[in-house]
């Protein structure tokens, strides 16, 4: 028996026998990952003590999850989202210096190549929903404006669907746009107030949520990707704090600092200049970008 062979497999020595077998792996990181995964997985199985039937149900669940995936649908990411793993990976990889804006999940509905629009443009192309004016500044952690930052925004429509979920029903690039900040780091555009919506729940992940007594909804939000030379890219949202699902986001994406203020506003002159029908939602939210290599707590 060579050094990496730890004897015959038993319930007691299961972890050592399996991880020992990996001791000659050429990739140290893979070896480490598999050591941790094996240890945690065996621990879970020993605690749960599944029946053969239950283990087969788990295998079939994962099989259905894989079978649901195609070019447009990634059921494993959805599984990672509802287990809180996506937010955990995001948190570990986006530890920000103090004062920088926090990140949250990207989600599956970002589209590369949305049109770059003039500041102030209305991204709502289907004329549905309540008008919203949204503005703010992009700043560094010292409070200086960042000019020429690129802001990619997207949101669901008034019925809770993204354009890509309703091709042929919504206009292409409805509620999407790319803007560039001016010399003062300012951005502003027009849209409609977003609504809460369910994550895609017609597959095994939706079934799992149902069995766990959980709803599939995400509270109303607007997605942002903000890029500027010399700064870490920020992938984030702003949320409506008054949304009924604000405390129970199906994918755990809400953070206190991402709650924006949505003010219902009566300002006829402004409404006229924005080409709005009447009263509108007014939102102002600044974002602070971290410089590349600026570490948490070092600002
Ligand atoms: C979204 O916000 O677009 C989203 C995020 C995670 C899962 C599904 C949708
Ligand atoms: Fe979304």
Image (cartoon, rainbow, N blue to C red):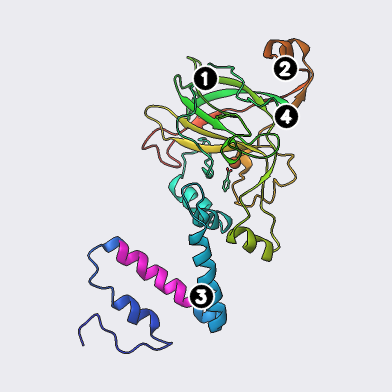
Which numbered tag is attached to residue 44?
3
Q: Earlier in the sequence, mark 4 or mark 1?
A: 1
Q: Earlier in the sequence, mark 3 or mark 4?
A: 3
Please say whether residue 79 is one of the residues in the magenta stretch.
no
Start and end of the magenta stretch?
30-44
What residue would you read off at disc 2?
Answer: 276
Please say whether residue 40 is one of the residues in the magenta stretch.
yes
Query: Label 4, label 1: how many angstroms apart (C-alpha)?
Result: 21 Å
Q: Earlier in the sequence, mark 2 or mark 3?
A: 3
Main secondary structure type of the part rendered in magenta: helix
What residue would you read off at disc 4?
Answer: 129
What residue would you read off at disc 1?
Answer: 117
Number of other residues with Cα within 10 Å of mark 4, as a class: few under 14, some 14 to 19, many 20 or more: some
Q: Determine the secondary structure under disc 2.
A: loop
Q: Earlier in the sequence, mark 1 or mark 2?
A: 1
Horizontal side, residue 227 vs residue 212: left or right: left
Q: Determine contact: label 2, label 3, CB under 8 Å.
A: no
The x and y percentages for residue 251 are 60, 51
Foreground pick, 205 / 96 = 205
Query: Label 1, label 3: how many angstroms apart (C-alpha)?
Result: 51 Å
Residue at x-position 63% and y-position 25%: 125
Q: Determine contact: label 3, label 4, CB under 8 Å.
A: no
Q: Determine the secondary structure under disc 1.
A: loop
Q: Which of labels 3 and 4 is toward the front? A: 4
Q: Quadrant for the C terminus, please.
A: top left
């Amino acid at each position: 028996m060579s050094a990496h062979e730890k004897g015959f497999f038993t319930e007691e020595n299961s972890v050592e026998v399996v991880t020992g077998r990996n001791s000659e792996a050429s990739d140290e990181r893979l070896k480490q990952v598999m050591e941790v995964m094996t240890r945690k997985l065996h621990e879970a199985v020993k605690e749960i003590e599944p029946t053969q039937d239950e283990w087969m149900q788990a295998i079939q669940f994962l099989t259905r999850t894989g079978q649901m995936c195609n070019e447009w649908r990634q059921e494993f990411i959805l599984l990672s989202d509802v287990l809180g793993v996506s937010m955990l990976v995001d948190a570990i990889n986006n530890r920000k210096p103090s004062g920088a804006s926090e990140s949250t999940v990207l989600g599956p509905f970002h589209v590369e190549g949305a049109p770059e629009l003039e500041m102030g443009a209305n991204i709502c192309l289907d004329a549905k929903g309540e008008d919203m004016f949204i503005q703010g500044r992009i700043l560094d952690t010292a409070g200086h404006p960042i000019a020429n930052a690129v802001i990619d925004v997207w949101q669901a429509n008034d019925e809770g669907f993204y354009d890509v979920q309703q091709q042929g029903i919504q206009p292409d690039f409805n509620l999407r746009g790319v803007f560039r900040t001016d010399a003062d780091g300012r951005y502003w555009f027009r849209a409609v107030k977003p609504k809460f919506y369910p994550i895609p729940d017609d597959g095994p992940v939706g079934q799992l949520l149902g069995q766990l007594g959980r709803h599939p909804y995400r509270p109303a939000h607007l997605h942002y990707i903000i890029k500027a030379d010399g700064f870490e890219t920020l992938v984030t949202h702003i949320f409506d704090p008054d949304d009924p699902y604000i405390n129970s986001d199906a994918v755990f994406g809400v953070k206190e600092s991402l709650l924006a203020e949505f003010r219902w506003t009566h300002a006829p002159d402004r409404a006229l200049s924005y080409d709005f029908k009447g009263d509108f939602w007014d939102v102002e939210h600044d974002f602070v970008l971290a410089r590349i290599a600026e570490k948490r707590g070092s600002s």
